[in-house]
Image: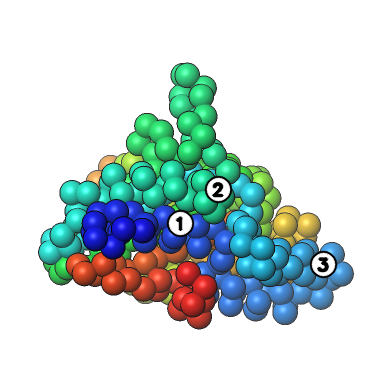
């Protein structure tokens, strides 16, 4: 890392952040898995949870990703208008993806449509994905979401007729998780987006996965629906790895946007037990903290 060149320094910070995020789960996910592990009493469920925690220990010990499928890199930037490297951030992230793929190492997953060619370095058309939110201030909050292909298999978004109501949106989520949730390596983190169009609902469902486990929707009715859906989905009994057990989900998170009078759109995104969602805060002087892994900062 060249400390004399701030742009290269920023790229180096992000590359280290990517590599670290592939190998260690965030504090809230580890805590929730620990709780769910303690609840299980069937021998199979206990064995699967034991294997999960052994995997995490080995990933840390050998400095290797905790899941071989390190996914398509997705970034969500919440940048202050005073952060001095907004114009360079996209290029920094792209360079960091190449460096992390080589050094972590990460499995190359970016395949171009139509040409069917893998770039070999986790970059491609619009990949790494970068979503922007511009706010006041001078810090950059950068979320990274690294999801294996199985996490995307239950995903969907659709627009409903208004007379179908919220009940049909809930039914669509329930049916999808019951049918395809096992493909995403339970216990799942379920992200639901509600809005007036499929693009809004789909984006909000992915952003719902960025919330820390233990947080609730800011609307009391939304928070209550999260709780009820958690209980309903747990009743399916997917259990760890889909081998059956007391729980199906780590949590259900709902994010919403005001809708058109004539439409109700719902989107679903799921995260697997190895939920590699990380958050780093970088200030204008390029000092940084990993906010999602506060108990593991010394390892980054």
Q: Which residue is mark 1?
A: 18
Percent from the top left, x then y, of residue 291?
A: 40, 73
- From the viewer's perspective, is residue 261 above or below residue 17? above
- From the viewer's perspective, is residue 29 above or below residue 6? below
Q: Secondary structure at mark 2?
A: loop
Residue nearest the viewer, comparing 108 with 174: 108
Contact? badges 2 and 1 (CB < 8 Å): yes
Percent from the top left, x then y, of residue 212?
A: 45, 70
Mark 2 closeness class: few <14, some 14–19, many ≥20 residues within 10 Å: many
Mark 3 closeness class: few <14, some 14–19, many ≥20 residues within 10 Å: few
Answer with mark 1 or mark 3, whichever residue precedes in sequence.
Answer: 1
- From the viewer's perspective, is residue 164 above or below residue 240? above
Q: Is residue 90 visible?
A: yes
Q: Secondary structure at mark 3?
A: helix
Q: Which residue is mark 2?
A: 106
Q: Secondary structure at mark 1?
A: helix
Residue nearest the viewer, comparing 110 with 259: 110
Left or right for 140, reference 292: left
The answer for how far apart the CA atoms under marks 2 and 3 are is 27 Å
Q: Which residue is mark 3?
A: 47
Q: Residue furthest top?
A: 115
């Amino acid at each position: 890392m060249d400390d004399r060149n701030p742009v290269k320094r920023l790229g180096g910070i992000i590359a280290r952040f990517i590599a670290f995020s592939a190998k260690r789960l965030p504090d809230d996910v580890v805590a929730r898995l620990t709780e769910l592990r303690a609840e299980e009493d069937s021998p199979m469920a206990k064995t699967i949870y034991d294997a999960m925690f052994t995997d995490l220990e080995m990933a840390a010990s050998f400095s290797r990703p905790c899941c071989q499928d390190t996914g398509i890199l997705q970034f969500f930037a919440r940048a202050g208008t005073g952060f001095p490297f907004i114009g360079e951030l996209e290029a920094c992230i792209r360079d960091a993806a190449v460096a992390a793929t080589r050094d972590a190492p990460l499995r190359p997953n970016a395949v171009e449509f139509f040409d069917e060619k893998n770039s070999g370095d986790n970059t491609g058309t619009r990949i790494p994905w970068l979503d922007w939110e511009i706010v006041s201030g001078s810090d950059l909050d950068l979320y990274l979401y690294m999801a294996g292909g199985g996490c995307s298999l239950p995903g969907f978004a659709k627009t409903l007729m208004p007379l179908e109501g919220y009940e049909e949106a809930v039914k669509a989520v329930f049916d999808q998780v019951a049918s395809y949730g096992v493909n995403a390596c339970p216990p799942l983190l379920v992200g639901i987006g509600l809005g007036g169009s499929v693009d809004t609902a789909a984006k909000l469902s992915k952003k719902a996965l960025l919330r820390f486990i233990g947080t609730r929707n800011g609307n009391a009715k939304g928070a209550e629906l999260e709780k009820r859906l958690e209980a309903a989905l747990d009743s399916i009994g997917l259990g760890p790895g889909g081998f059956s057990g007391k729980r199906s989900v780590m949590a259900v998170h709902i994010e919403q946007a005001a809708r058109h009078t004539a439409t109700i759109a719902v989107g679903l995104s799921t995260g697997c037990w190895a939920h590699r969602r990380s958050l780093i805060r970088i200030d204008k002087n390029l000092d940084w903290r990993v906010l999602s892994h506060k108990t593991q900062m010394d390892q980054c």
